[in-house]
Image (cartoon, grey):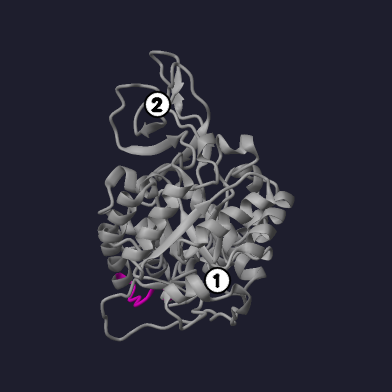
Amino acid sequence: MASLSFTQIRTNNSVADFARARPRTTWARPTRVGFKVFASETQAEPDLSVTVNGLHMPNPFVIGSGPPGTNYTVMKRAFEEGWGAVIAKTVSLDASKVINVTPRYARLRAGVNGSAKAKGQIIGWENIELISDRSLDIMLNEFKQLKEEFPDRILIASIMEEYNKAAWEELIDRVEQTGVDALEINFSCPHGMPERKMGAAVGQDCALLEEVCGWVNAKATVPVWAKMTPNITDISQPARVALRSGCEGIAAINTIMSVMGINLDTLRPEPCVEGYSTPGGYSSKAVHPIALAKVMSIAKMMKSEFGDKDFSLSGIGGVETGGDAAEFILLGANTVQVCTGVMMHGYGLVNQLCAELKDFMKAHNFSSIEDFRGVSLQYFTTHMDLVRRQQEAIQQRKAIRKGLQSDKDWTGDGFVKETESMVSN
């Protein structure tokens, strides 16, 4: 099948060497493979492994930054269960400024929103949780411990700082000393942090984003992914800025700003903290179509404007099945992140995801992720083009249509045959 390659292996070094020693300025960015159609004659077990920005993962499934990567214990569990990579919960220099509240989650179930009696399937999840409230020193020690125990597994640090160049440089330096394999820059948290000119406050301002990306990429020596906010009109614009400013990858999407609902018994918003609430980030199954549209937009931009560059794309949003993941990959994603899905189903979800993705690949005779990555991008176009295509198809069908076009075409001599020409069975 067609193969759309955004990423190629840059180095033959081990992951550990890559993360610790290789200067980014020496990276080669080879021309990527274009669309090719092929199929294997014999069906072998599909290979789920991926290599992204030089980092080798056993599968494309990545723990997304959030509660599933909040400490050593849970990140170790993720590696043991078989996740392809782990992105830790976002850290900053001064965790004392981060004060979380409880409860901080609210769920949307299929049924009547605002009703305590709604017991249907969970389709939406809102959080008002902030970044890590744990000491940076503790988190850094745990990063180091994880890399010592799992040297061949990919650990990515998610980082965020205030609008201060020196603070960003200090944070990057301290985090990289632990041996993490890459950095994901949180330019997208929609609540709490923008009040400190952090998170989405940067991701929504392309000028500010360009400046901060410049600081980050001048300092970092490992691959950098920029995590995009969906709370913007055209997500391809900040993604473009991030790539042009030196980032190696884009991750999208973070959560969508939302109000989960109002409790119709108490008249208070959810999640309710001492009778009050604040808008938060929306995730889970309901955001999946929105995430697909955003990822499609970024992927098309990357293909058209950075086609010969070695950039990566990580899809995020409502992934609970292997089919959900396949959709992101078909739109060009190299990896697929899962956060809320783990909170709902546990770390063992990765086994289901891998099995279902393999089933999808077998059904289409795909042997690797690259066999089908980006294949579906070619089927997106403009509405005007859809109209043109449909008009052409209608004219073509008319030209070959069997039977009579009008009552005036009936003849007495060929009446029986003319009748038969319009029978469907």
Q: In front: mark 1 or mark 2?
A: 2
In-front residue for pair 197/60: 197
Q: Quadrant of residue 361?
A: bottom left
In-front residue for pair 61/405: 61
- Tell me what residue is drawn at x 35 percent, y 47 percent: 341
Q: Position of residue 257 (x, y in %)?
A: 54, 37
Figure check: 213 above or below 196: below
The crowd level at tag 2 (other Cα within 10 Å; few <14, some 14-19, many 20+) is: some
Q: Mark 1 — residue? A: 399
Q: Quadrant of residue 370?
A: bottom left
Task: Return the residue found at the far bottom.
Answer: 41
- Tell me what residue is drawn at x 46 percent, y 36 percent: 129
- Specify whether residue 241 is in view: no
Q: Quadrant of residue 173?
A: bottom right
What's the residue type where badge 1 is placed? Answer: Ala
Spatial CA span between label 1 and label 2: 52 Å
In terms of sequence position, does the residue under pointer 1 or pointer 2 come before the other?
Answer: 2
Q: Position of residue 29 (x, y in %)?
A: 60, 79
- Tell me what residue is drawn at x 26 percent, y 80 percent: 44
Q: Mark 2 — residue? A: 113
The C terminus lies in which quarter of the figure?
bottom left
Determine whether, in the image, residue 50 is placed left or right of residue 228: left
Magenta stretch in the rendered image:
363-370
Q: Secondary structure at mark 1?
A: helix
The crowd level at tag 1 (other Cα within 10 Å; few <14, some 14-19, many 20+) is: few
